[in-house]
Each structure stands twice: as structure tokens, then as C-alpha cells.
Image (cartoon, coloured by chain):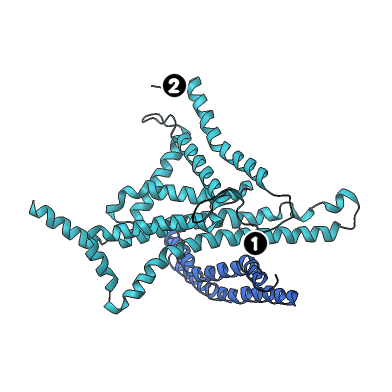
């Protein structure tokens, strides 16, 4: 089956999927433009609040971070559907190569860092990587990066914590409780603290890195604004307000703070998730029990 | 009097933030050591370059954590604490 010329329906679906990738970002711009208060110059701000609903215990607040992370999810879904659209076994297309490369890399990462028991983990880790990376890269489009809000990253860290606890419980609650008394019984409080320190440190690491990058970017932009108004300020009219030094220079910094740091943190978050989850799984004990069970039968 | 109190609050918050960031020294030295050793390792065994770099980045990220705790505290002290403390002051004193 060799149809070089694509049908109209195929093309229409392609256009729809590309729109699914781009429209969320446009929606983010529109929302931001609607809700940003009258500008007060360059300032370091948290997430904008889009909606606040009265609830009995605490007000339910819908912030920019939540909305943007949903937009990123839709966008990434569109990207995945686009890459796998029209995938065939025999004749490979360009996008199929990209999709296959991504899947192979994710599976290779899992094989390298986790037990054989966790082979099915590749989709989860790849999803986490993609979400984290694209959330950090969202700041390149001028929107608020969801990863520079602690709540978003803390949610992911709690997910990792739940996974860690689930795999520690694999051999029953008794083995789980016993693992706190190692190597000596009186160290149990320390073990419990270090159990809770894992998600806290993961959340703070990701959030701190992205936030510090955006704070430094804002400070440098403000500094360059001041410098250009000091140099050009005494000139009349439009030239006096021209932000000369703000052209291009902040972009160089954003290569490090937005692109490199964001991708590195995504990789590190996924890597630590893999290491912690596979380290939490009592592989020897599980294998022993499994072989005992099969021997019984 | 109220102005003085607010001034003390703002100044103390700024000083606290600056002092908290002394913690940045530790990760700086630690990461420097890690990168130096990684360079040595790559010099000895250039074929292991990829693995050494990955491991080094992981180690750096973990070593960075204490510095980032300090950073979070400093950011809280700069952006969150002054407003809250001034609010508390206003509630209690300046009615």
C-alpha cells in the first residue's frame, strides 16, 4: 500500500491536530491579556488568579499555573496524536521516525535505570518528562511557567511519593513497617523524616531552579531597562523611551535559564522518580516470595 | 513610630534573606568539586564521557538542594513575609 498523495481527510485531521497544539497557547495569551491588571512596569509576580469560588473551609482558587498546566497537557496530547497520526508498519514517514525515536529513548532510559520488573513504566516516565519539559518551556512563549509555582510541582512530587509507598508495600505492610527499623531500631524517627523529605526536596528542587531562573531574568530585564533609560533618557520623544539594551540580551540568558535549566530539571525529576521508585521496591524479597508461591502450585 | 516599625520589619526581612543565602556557598563548593572530579574522570577515560556527565549532573542536582532550600526561604522573606508582618502589625497597633 503506497499512497504518496495524502487524502483530504488525512490533511484535515493533520490541521486539526496542529491547531490542538497551538490553540492552547493562544488561549493562554488571551486569558493572560484579559486578566493582567494595568501594567506597573517590570515586576516579579506570582501566578495570576483567574477565578475564586467560595468554599466552606478555604476559597477554591483557580490560578494561572493550574490553567497553564492543563493547556500544556492538551498541547502535548495534540503533539503526540500528530506524531502518531497515520503511522504504518511498512512505509515510515518522517514524523513516525520521531515518534519511534522518542519511544525507544524512553524505553532505553527505563532499561538502564530500573529493575526488569518496571518495564511498563516507560509511558509514565515519558509523560512526566514531556509535561515537565514543556511546562518549563512555556515561559518562552511569554506565559507563566506552571513549574515555577510550588503547588504544581508539589502535586507531581506527591504522585511520586504515592508510587514509592505503593512499591514499598508490595510485600505486605509488615515488610514495609520493618523497613523503617533498619539498620537499627532506634533510627526509625529519622527514617520516617527522610521518607517525607523525599517529596519535599523533589518539589523544592524543581520549583526553586525554575523560579530562580525567572527571578534572575526579571531582575536583569529591569536592570537593562534602567541602563537604557540612563543612556538614552535625556534624548527627546520616542528615542528617550527606547529599551535599547533589552533587545536580544535577555534572550541569551533565557537560553540557559529557560531552555537548558528547564530541560535539565525535567530530566532530573524523571531520573529521581525512576531511582526512588526502583529503589523502594524490595526486589529480592519479592522474587523470593514469588518463587515460593509458584513452587507451592 | 509606625513608620519606624515598618522600616525595621522590611530591613530585617532583607537582612534575613541575605543571610539565608550564605547557604549558597556549600553547594557552590560541592558542585565545583563534583565537576572537577568529573573532568578528571573524562580525562582518564574519554570513552565514558556520556555516563560521567549524566551522573555528574544528577549529583549536582542533589547537592544543589540545600542551596535551593535557602533560596526558597530568601524568596519567602522578600516577597511574602513583609506583607504578612506589616498586616499583623497594623492589626495589633495601628488601628
Any idea which chain is the cyan one in this picture? A
Residue A83 drawn at (x, y percent): 46, 36
Which mark sits nearer the N-terminus, 1 or 2?
Answer: 2
The quadrant the C terminus of chain B occupies is bottom right
Q: Is residue A56 visible?
A: yes
Along the line of sight, which residue is nearer the eye, A182 or B64?
Answer: A182
Using the rendered view, name the quadrant where residue B79 is placed.
bottom right
Numbered label attached to residue A136:
none
Badge 1 marks a residue whose secondary structure is helix
Q: Which residue is mark 1?
A: A216
Chain containing the residue with disc 2: A
Q: Residue furthest left?
A: A296
Q: For the point 40% across and 55% down, which residue is it?
A: A159
Q: Which residue is mark 2?
A: A3
Q: For the point 66% across and 46% down, which residue is it?
A: A35
Q: Is residue A192 above or below residue A116?
A: below
Residue A185 drawn at (x, y percent): 27, 77
Disc 1: CA contacts within 10 A as few (<14), some (14-19) or many (>=20): some
Disc 2: CA contacts within 10 A as few (<14), some (14-19) or many (>=20): few
Along the line of sight, which residue is nearer the eye, A46 or A135?
Answer: A46
Q: Is residue A113 visible?
A: no
Q: Colour of chain B?
A: blue
Q: For the point 54% across and 62% down, which residue is it?
A: A208
Chain containing the residue with disc 1: A
Badge 2 marks a residue whose secondary structure is loop
Q: Is residue B66 left or right of residue A250?
A: left
Residue A284 drawn at (x, y percent): 22, 62
Residue A226 drawn at (x, y percent): 78, 60
Amino acid at each position: 500500500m503506497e499512497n504518496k498523495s495524502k487524502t483530504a481527510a488525512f490533511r484535515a485531521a493533520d490541521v486539526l491536530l496542529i491547531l490542538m497544539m497551538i490553540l492552547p497557547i493562544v488561549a493562554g495569551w488571551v486569558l493572560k491579556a484579559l486578566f493582567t491588571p494595568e501594567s506597573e512596569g517590570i515586576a516579579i509576580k506570582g501566578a495570576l488568579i483567574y477565578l475564586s469560588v467560595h468554599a466552606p473551609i478555604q476559597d477554591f482558587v483557580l490560578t494561572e499555573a493550574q490553567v497553564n498546566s492543563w493547556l500544556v497537557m492538551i498541547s502535548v496530547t495534540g503533539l503526540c496524536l500528530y506524531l502518531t497520526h497515520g503511522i504504518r508498519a511498512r512505509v515510515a514517514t518522517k514524523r513516525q521516525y520521531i515518534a519511534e525515536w522518542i519511544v525507544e529513548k524512553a524505553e532505553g532510559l527505563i532499561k538502564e535505570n530500573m529493575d526488569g520488573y518496571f518495564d511498563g513504566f516507560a509511558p509514565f516516565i515519558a509523560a512526566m518528562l514531556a509535561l515537565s519539559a514543556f511546562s518549563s518551556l512555556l515561559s518562552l512563549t511569554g506565559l507563566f511557567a506552571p513549574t515555577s509555582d510550588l503547588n504544581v510541582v508539589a502535586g507531581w512530587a506527591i504522585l511520586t511519593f504515592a508510587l514509592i509507598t505503593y512499591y514499598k508495600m508490595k510485600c505486605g505492610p509488615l515488610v514495609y513497617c520493618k523497613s523503617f527499623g533498619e539498620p537499627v531500631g532506634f533510627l526509625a524517627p529519622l527514617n520516617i523524616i527522610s521518607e517525607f523529605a523525599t517529596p519535599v526536596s523533589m518539589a523544592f528542587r524543581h520549583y526553586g531552579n525554575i523560579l530562580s531562573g525567572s527571578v534572575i531574568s526579571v531582575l536583569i530585564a529591569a536592570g537593562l531597562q534602567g541602563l537604557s533609560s540612563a543612556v538614552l533618557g535625556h534624548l527627546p520623544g520616542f528615542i528617550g523611551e527606547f529599551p535599547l539594551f533589552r533587545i536580544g540580551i535577555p534572550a541569551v540568558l533565557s537560553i540557559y535559564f529557560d531552555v537548558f535549566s528547564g530541560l535539565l530539571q525535567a530530566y532530573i525529576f524523571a531520573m529521581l522518580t525512576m531511582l526512588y521508585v526502583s529503589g523502594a521496591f524490595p526486589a529480592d524479597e519479592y522474587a523470593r516470595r514469588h518463587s515460593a508461591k509458584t513452587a507451592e502450585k | 513610630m509606625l513608620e519606624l516599625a515598618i522600616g525595621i520589619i522590611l530591613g530585617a526581612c532583607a537582612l534575613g534573606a541575605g543571610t539565608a543565602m550564605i547557604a549558597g556557598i556549600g553547594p557552590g563548593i560541592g558542585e565545583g568539586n563534583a565537576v572537577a572530579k568529573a573532568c578528571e574522570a573524562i580525562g582518564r577515560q574519554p570513552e565514558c564521557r556520556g555516563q560521567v556527565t549524566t551522573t555528574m549532573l544528577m549529583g549536582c542536582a542533589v547537592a544543589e538542594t540545600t542551596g535551593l532550600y535557602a533560596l526558597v526561604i530568601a524568596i519567602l522573606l522578600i516577597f511574602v513575609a513583609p506583607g504578612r508582618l506589616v498586616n499583623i502589625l497594623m492589626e495589633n497597633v495601628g488601628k
